[in-house]
Image: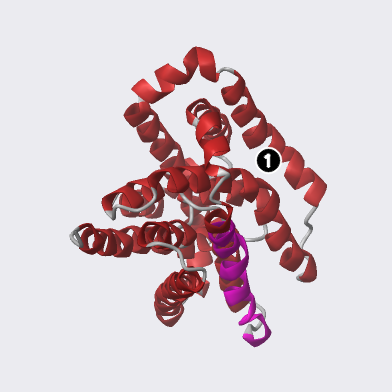
Amino acid sequence: MAIIAVIAIAYFFPKYGSEESEIPIDLIGSIGISLIFFFYGLKLSGKQIITGLKNWRLHLLIQLSTFLIFPIIVIIFFPYIQQGSQETIWLSFLFLAALPSTVSSSVVMVSMAKGNIPAAIFNASISGLIGIVITPLWVGIFLQESGTDFDLGDIYLKLLIEILVPVILGLLLQKYWGSFAQMYSKQLSLFDKTIILLIIYKSFAESFEEGIFTIVGIWELAFVGIATSFLFFSVYYITGYLSRMLKFNKEDQITAQFCGTKKSLVHGTVFSKVLFPESIPTGIILLPLMIFHAFQILIISLIATRLANRF
């Protein structure tokens, strides 16, 4: 609901998100992003990561689902895409497919469904770190093919400064401030969401001001909604099938399907600022991700509620 409200505000008051605005939203967003990942480092449990390494087949399936199965499904449709708005929408789906998994919602949903909670914590935590390396690689391949100026070295430098350094700093200071981060976890989560909403406002304000959404018709928006649900259920059933093939118990199967189908809105909003040049409208790039974000929470929560009643 907050995302919808922010998009509405961006539509009616786009001037505060423009380049000429007196409010330095870009600077606030950059500082906020670094703080998000600093607090992420403070809350990241080294012991849980080391313990979690034992169940390697489950972790491998989840990470392959997140960073390989998702992008392959989207890439299959690449030969059928025409240049123009179709190419931009397809690129937004590739971006969605290449993103890491969520942390909080994955763990909460696995817990609701009585799945393997330690494995969910491990995979949700490690996914964000893997995504810093993998997501730019997937997006970079096709941005370079389209002739867009894409400097992978510059991208990694920005990600290093804005994301990786704060995470490492948080890990180093964990024994001093880790208990503080756990104690005020809800407040820090509210801070995370506020920064994300600020970035979404900025992205959509610029898109509305430049008239970007006039090139996206009602049929294309309907297509985005249908394609989003198709992508989710494809990966959900593939991970379920592979889990049964690998003879996972029910708890591990739940964790594989729940963690392997999630995509992080936090990483998406952050990465979109860094990965895409100004010539590509960030509002359209974020559109499938925001629909997917709402869809994954709704569907997985319904499935989790059903599974919770199995005992």
* Residue on which the image places disc 1: 159
User: Residue 212, can we see it?
Assistant: yes
Task: Please say whether residue 28 is visible from this viewpoint.
Answer: no
Counting from the top left corner in percent of width and height, residue 188 is at 39, 29
Can you say whether 106 is above or below 244 in the image? above
Q: How is the image coloured?
A: secondary structure
Residue 69: x %, y % from top left = 58, 69
| Residue 161 is inside the magenta segment | no
Q: Which residue is drawn at 22% across and 57% down?
A: 308
User: Which region of the structure is painted magenta?
Assistant: 60-80
From the viewer's side, name the closer residue of 146 and 102: 102
Residue with the most extreme top position: 176
Q: Is mark 1 on a helix, strand or loop?
A: helix
Q: Does the magenta stretch include residue 75?
A: yes
Identity of the amino acid at label 1?
Answer: Leu
View extreme (bottom): residue: 80
Magenta span: predominant SS is helix
Q: In this view, does 248 lie above or below 205?
A: below
Judge by depth and name the residue closer to the eye, 259 or 61: 61
**Mark 1 Cα within 10 Å, few/some/many (few <14, many 20+)?**
many
Q: Quadrant of the C terminus?
A: bottom left
Q: Establish if 259 lies above or below 241.
A: above
Q: Nearer the viewer, residue 112 or 52?
A: 52
- Rendered location of residue 89, percent (x, y): 56, 71
Residue 244, given in percent of the width and then of the height, sits at: 45, 72
Kindly indicate the quadrant of the structure image that contains residue 258. Answer: bottom left
Q: 228 or 200: nearer the eye?
A: 228
Which residue does the image show at 35% across and 21% down from the upper left? 183
How many marks overall?
1
Instruction: Look at 51% across and 72% down and name the residue there.
Output: 242
